Amino acid sequence: MSINSALLAGVSGLVANSSALAAISDNIANVNTIAYKRNEVSFANVVTSQAVAGRYSAGGVQGINKQYVSQQGLVQASGSSTDLAISGDGFFVVSSKGAGLTAADPRSFTRAGSFTVDADGFLVNKSNFYLQGWPVQANGAFDVNPSDLSKMGAINVKNLGAAVSATTAIKVSANLDKSQVLAAAAGSLGPPAVAPTYVAASNTSMADYANGVATGTKPDFTIEMNVTDSTGGSRKVAMAFLKSSAAPNEWNAEIYAIPASDVQVGTNEPGQISKGLVHFNPDGSINLATTTLFGAAGSPATISLAASTATGTAAAPAWGTALGVSGQSLALDLAKITQYAATSTVNSISSDGAGVGNIVAINVDEAGVVSAIYDNSQIRKVAKVGVATFPNADGLQAISGNAYRTSLKAGQMVVKEAGEGGAGHISPSSLEASTVDLSAEFTGLIQTQKAYSASSKIITTADQMLEELINIKR
């Protein structure tokens, strides 16, 4: 009967508008939820077959829920360096636990990037989902795999230990006084053929003088440089100069350790790492092409110290046995050493080494690389955040905590590096706002209320008509 179908159509209207009200309520309640994606119930008519010509049977309406997961929310600045937002397509890969994660554990996907460091050092958001990333390899690279989530792990930024950076380069800016009075010791050395003719047995080197040997030769000028070894220890290396009597733009030079026991030098004087001549051009600039301080003329300005040896002897300069440190090579940039008629002075000394440091901050760059920053200015890469993309993000299955799981409707997941292959860019120190528009939701509330009232009128009208039909018998 058509009246019965009208009654059922009214009921379907009540049910569909109730669902619409529930969706609107969810949206309004989550207006301040980070990266929340609004839901909407749209309506579709239900058509029944018309069995009798001239009669119409109402089919009613059905509510179809649609979630706008792919809709971009406003990216807003945040005060935390571990707050992350994705500008563009994609999701953060997260898990429900940090330690002990296995390939069998489910992974979820979210755009809620309000991550903080928990008590165990993991990056976790407000819904207790742990951020996943590709851990850094020994060579500093990342093993990026677009489909194997087992390559990713929960990012931990605390269990890294201290950081040490051994010195590899030293830059020196100084001036040697061209008008320096020739020392008596320089004249007694005689004109050297290749290098200063110090006699090892006579203890007349500048390294000997630094070690307190009475017969050692006092330098005209000394530059002391701090060196950080492989364990973070601070060592001192000096570069001493003595004006030569052989040529006006020539200086005898030595490089030695302070104290001498810090290095083993083979047949050299105690503590002496190298010796030779330093030449300058007539304009006062250094002539490294003819300088022999580092070996043959034109040799690179490099000091090489081998690792500590077990026997306590070394054919070439090496760190002292008692130090127990690795070998290292120091590249000296001497281009700013000049010979002008002015007082010998050191302008500046800079090096790239750093002693033992502890973590003071966590940084995430736009490429998704998570780094630990140490109080000794060192930066250590920890992991790289991947961005998961889906052909149809709106088809993902929503779960509690403002996250999603894969589904057939969503399509095949692919994890990409941020900004690559259509994946969105990561915005550090930012959060994505909810996509809820309160004005639109309140307007929808009014429309839903009116539609609900109208559906109830259908039921009351059909009830009255059925009552009239029943009264015919009376």
Image: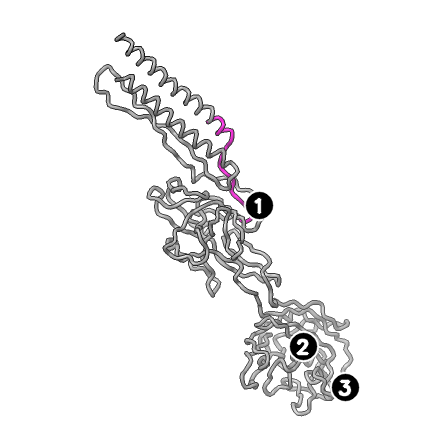
Label of residue 184 in the image: 3
> Can see residue 274?
no
Q: Residue at x 35, y 21 (%)?
A: 10
Question: How many residues crowd around disc 2 within 10 Å: few (fewer than 14), some, or many (20 or more)?
Answer: many
Question: How many residues crowd around disc 3 within 10 Å: few (fewer than 14), some, or many (20 or more)?
Answer: few
Q: Determine whether, in the image, residue 398 is placed left or right of residue 180.
A: left
Mark 2: secondary structure? strand
Mark 3: secondary structure? helix
Q: Residue 56: name its quadrant.
A: top left
Which colour assignment does the render follow?
one colour
Q: Residue at x 56, y 85 (%)?
A: 314
Looking at the rendered image, the disc whose residue lies closer to the viewer, 2 or 3, is 2
Q: Could you tell which of marks 1 and 3 lies nearer the N-terminus?
A: 1
Span shown in magenta: 428-444
Residue 122 highlighted magenta (yes or no): no
Estimate the x, y position of residue 288 in percent, counting from the top left: 62, 74
Label of residue 388 in the image: none
Q: Eyeballing the image, is 257 above or below 368?
A: below
Estimate the x, y position of residue 26 in percent, counting from the top left: 46, 34
Mark 1–mark 3 Cα distance, whole angstroms, equals: 69 Å
Estimate the x, y position of residue 374 in percent, counting from the top left: 59, 61
Q: Amino acid at mark 2?
A: Met
Mark 1–mark 2 Cα distance, whole angstroms, equals: 50 Å
Residue pointed to by mark 1: 78
Q: Residue at x 59, y 81 (%)?
A: 322
Q: Residue 276: name its quadrant.
A: bottom right
Q: Amino acid at mark 1?
A: Ser
Residue pointed to by mark 2: 239
Q: Eyeballing the image, is 134 above or below 410?
A: below
Estimate the x, y position of residue 263 in percent, counting from the top left: 61, 81
Q: Amino acid at mark 3?
A: Ala
